[in-house]
């Protein structure tokens, strides 16, 4: 007994060739290569179960990327690149509490000597830095622990957008 056939996915020659080239590029992240291969196999008429077995992924993963690709079918390639079509969907969760500019100001303050802000200490502590950030009006409220987390990941993830 066969299950329901998945929706058919058709690719024009140019898109197929672009996806095939995409899977051969050395700098393409492997996660995106996998997704591109799933799309190519779906366009070849394979079922989600067949794709899952061949690519060693779950049937749900094959279904997800087939359907995600189909959801962009009406959008021309010039408007939405292959990278954009194959990237992860935004994840749910609370929006960021602080803007990138605020994080930059917190990191910049942490790089200054505490004496410059009139603090009688030689090194910043989480408490001292949180208090100074509030006094300077950078943010209304922040915990010492959150300041530490921002500094820990702020150097690499938040500052890279300024130079990159």
Image (cartoon, rainbow, N blue to C red):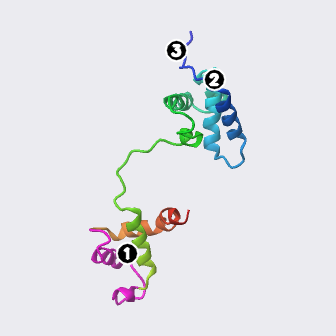
Q: How far apart are marks 2 and 3 (CA)?
A: 13 Å
Give the camera-side residue of 78 and 93.
78
- Please name the residue that numbered disc 3 is placed on: 4
Give the camera-side residue of 83 and 64.
83
Image coords of residue 20 (percent x, y): 70, 35
Marks 1 and 3, the one that precedes in the sequence: 3
The verdict on residue 72 being magenta is no
Asked where in the image residue 164 lies, by quadrant, the reply is bottom right
Total label count?
3
Q: Residue at x 43, y 45 (%)?
A: 91
Label 2 close to label 1 by CB (< 8 Å): no
- Please name the residue that numbered disc 1 is placed on: 126
In the displayed structure, would residue 123 be above or below residue 38?
below
Left-right relation of 129 to 1: left
Q: Is mark 1 on a helix, strand or loop?
A: helix
Image coords of residue 116 (percent x, y): 38, 88
Residue neighbourhood size for the residue with mark 2, other residues' Cα within 10 Å, grouped as few (<14), some (14–19), many (≥20): some
Asked where in the image residue 2 lies, by quadrant, the reply is top right
Asked where in the image residue 141 lies, by quadrant, the reply is bottom left
Q: Residue at x 53, y 39 (%)?
A: 80
- Please name the residue that numbered disc 2 is placed on: 50
Left-right relation of 126 to 74: left
Q: What element carries label 2?
A: helix
Mark 1 vs mark 3: in front: 3
Q: How far apart are marks 2 and 1 (CA)?
A: 54 Å
């Amino acid at each position: 007994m066969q299950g329901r056939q998945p929706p058919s996915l058709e690719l024009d020659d140019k898109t197929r060739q672009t996806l095939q080239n995409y899977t051969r590029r050395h700098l393409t992240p492997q996660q995106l290569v996998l997704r591109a291969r799933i799309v190519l196999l779906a366009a070849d008429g394979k079922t989600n179960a067949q794709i899952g077995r061949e690519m060693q992924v779950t049937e749900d993963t094959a279904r997800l990327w087939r359907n995600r690709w189909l959801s962009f079918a009406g959008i021309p390639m010039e408007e939405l690149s292959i990278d954009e079509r194959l990237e992860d969907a935004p994840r749910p969760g609370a929006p960021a509490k602080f803007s990138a500019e605020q994080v930059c100001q917190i990191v910049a303050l942490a790089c200054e000597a505490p004496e410059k802000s009139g603090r009688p200490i030689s090194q910043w502590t989480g408490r001292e830095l949180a208090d100074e950030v509030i006094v300077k009006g950078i943010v209304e409220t922040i915990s010492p622990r959150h300041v530490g987390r921002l500094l820990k990941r702020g150097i690499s993830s938040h500052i890279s957008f300024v130079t990159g």
